[in-house]
Amino acid sequence: MTLKELPSDVGPYRSTILGTDISDTALAQASYGCYNKVEMAVDCPQTESPAIFRPWARSGAFKDELRALGSFRKLNLLESFAGLAL
């Protein structure tokens, strides 16, 4: 969300966010960007902004333009990070 708020003339930089987890379920949820309202209120109170979040009945999702900034990979923090290179 912070990256989207920066002016577009910041420079020739392209930013992406890499999210990792050992859980396939957590990775799937993160890649879909869908969370229930309790999770969103606790972890990300800015989601009340319609510019970044599409509300649904009991849940919501980040807009596609924000989801496109992130990628998600399975990673066990007890193993080597060598395969993590982008």
Image (spheres, rainbow, N blue to C red):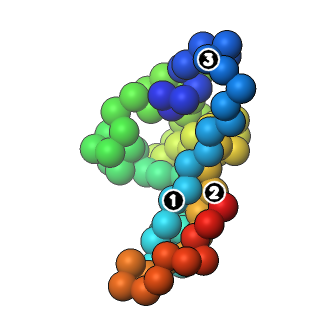
| Identity of the residue drawn at 40% across and 28% down | 46
Q: Helix, strand or loop at disc 1?
A: strand
Q: Are marks 2 and 1 in contact (CB under 8 Å)?
A: yes
In the rendered structure, the answer to whether residue 67 lies left or right of residue 56 reads right
Position of residue 41 measured from the top left corner of the image (x, y, whole percent): 32, 40
Packing grade of label 2 (10 A; few <14, some 14-19, many >=20) is some
- Residue occupied by mark 3: 10
Q: Helix, strand or loop at disc 3?
A: loop
| Identity of the residue drawn at 43% across and 86% down | 79
Q: Earlier in the sequence, mark 3 or mark 2?
A: 3
Q: Which mark is residue 71?
A: 2
Q: Is residue 54 visible?
A: yes
Q: Which mark is residue 19?
A: 1
Q: Is residue 86 above or below residue 62?
A: below
**Amino acid type, mark 3:** Val
Q: Is residue 75 above or below residue 2?
A: below
Foreground: 6 or 13? Answer: 13
Q: In the displayed orientation, state which residue is furthest to the bottom.
A: 79
**Quadrant location of the C terminus?**
bottom right
Q: Which mark is residue 48?
A: none
Q: CA distance from mark 3 to mark 1?
A: 24 Å
